[in-house]
Image (spheres, rainbow, N blue to C red):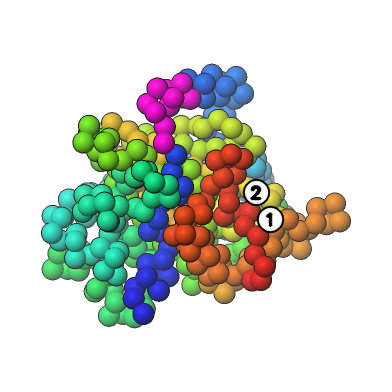
Amino acid sequence: GSAHSTMAALLRFLPSRQTVWAPGALRVLEKRENRVHRRMMSSSSDHPVVDCSVFFGSGSEPEKKDVLAQMKDALVVKGYFYAENVSVLPPEYIESVYAYHKKLHDLPTQVKSEYLVQKGGSYTGLDLGMDNAELPYEPGTVATVRAWDYSRWTPSENAKRLFYPGPEVLQPDMATFTDNLYDRQNVLGEALLTAFAEMFGLEPDTFRGHFKGDMGSIRLLYYPGCTAEEAAEANTGISAHTDFEAFTLMHQDAPGLQFLSPGGDTWIDAPVRPGEFVVIVGDVLERFTNGELKATPHRVVRTEHPRRSIIRFNAVNPNTLVEPMPQFVSDQRPPRYTPVRMKTHMETTMANLRAGKGAWDTQKNRSITANYVYSSP
């Protein structure tokens, strides 16, 4: 079949449902957000930061316990935290990823056109015409984002040469460079999945056991500064959604990313922290924990400044049955989610997006994908 039938091509080539904000409305929203936010949070707890060095052997057991409690509080109350002191992803390495990221996005459009998703490649972007923009969900909405996507889910070794720019295009070739990033992120990913279980007092392997052979992917995203010409064409960065996987690591080099905390109705600006990835919850962890953790709604507003981001979706194995685990189910708290295999959740979500059903309920401010009801796994 075409590359669209592979998981690598399926994963991320659509934005989420898009909302059009008039600039004035957005300014009003931001003012209101800032006012409410100041009232609700003390400045020290505005943006939770978790010292992850304790998950790599440093610090005592009591210190680790404290950090696990902070992490749980951050995810339950805010829906995200910044991961600091991750030795495998130091600031200088993150800088090198952005340097490579720039080389990829600076490739001539003629070269990019050989790697379009529509041709079974890994690039989408408005710079190659409306047909190659991230597909809209509503008439007249267009996202500015341009994306190079990487996943280990390729049909065969040979496919890599078709899918990603090779050594003849840039050095190192995209698959080699991005796979190294994937490996490094896996080190943090496994540590976090272990910690997510331990913060609930569960066996370390509870979530981590499903990670091997995960359906994860990396996106290297570029949002051009919104010129008048772009503004006429595009009206959002990426609109509100939750991620379909277990959790996501995100890094940005400029403002624009916003979060919605559980039960909140006010978008929070995510600060730029050069040395730290931000961690958010995805649909899978919400369903595994029977809603104890909630998938984190997020979006990127259109900005006048250009911005880049490094995104890693951490999923579970395609055959994993994602359902509320017994540890999170009781008579008082019966299962709130239907069982579904990871692969089915991904494929159904993508099919629904293509059919224009969206991923976000703007009326209820609620994720459609996290709460999706499946008739069978």
Please provide percent x and percent y for residue 257. 42, 38
Span shown in magenta: 20-30
* Residue at horizontal 73 percent and vertical 55 percent from the top: 336
* Residue density around tag 2, few if under 14, some if 14–19, many if 20 or more, within 10 Å: many
Please provide percent x and percent y for residue 163. 27, 70
* Residue density around tag 1, few if under 14, some if 14–19, many if 20 or more, within 10 Å: many
Q: Secondary structure at mark 2?
A: loop
Q: Do callouts 1 and 2 mark residues in contact (Cβ within 8 Å)?
A: yes
* Residue at horizontal 65 percent and vertical 49 percent from the top: 293
Q: Which residue is mark 1?
A: 289
Q: Secondary structure at mark 1?
A: loop
Report if residue 345 is visible in the image.
Answer: yes
For the stretch drawn in magenta, the main secondary structure is: helix
Q: Is residue 304 above or below residue 297?
A: above
Q: Name the quarter where the C terminus is drawn.
A: bottom right
Amino acid at the residue labelled 1? Thr
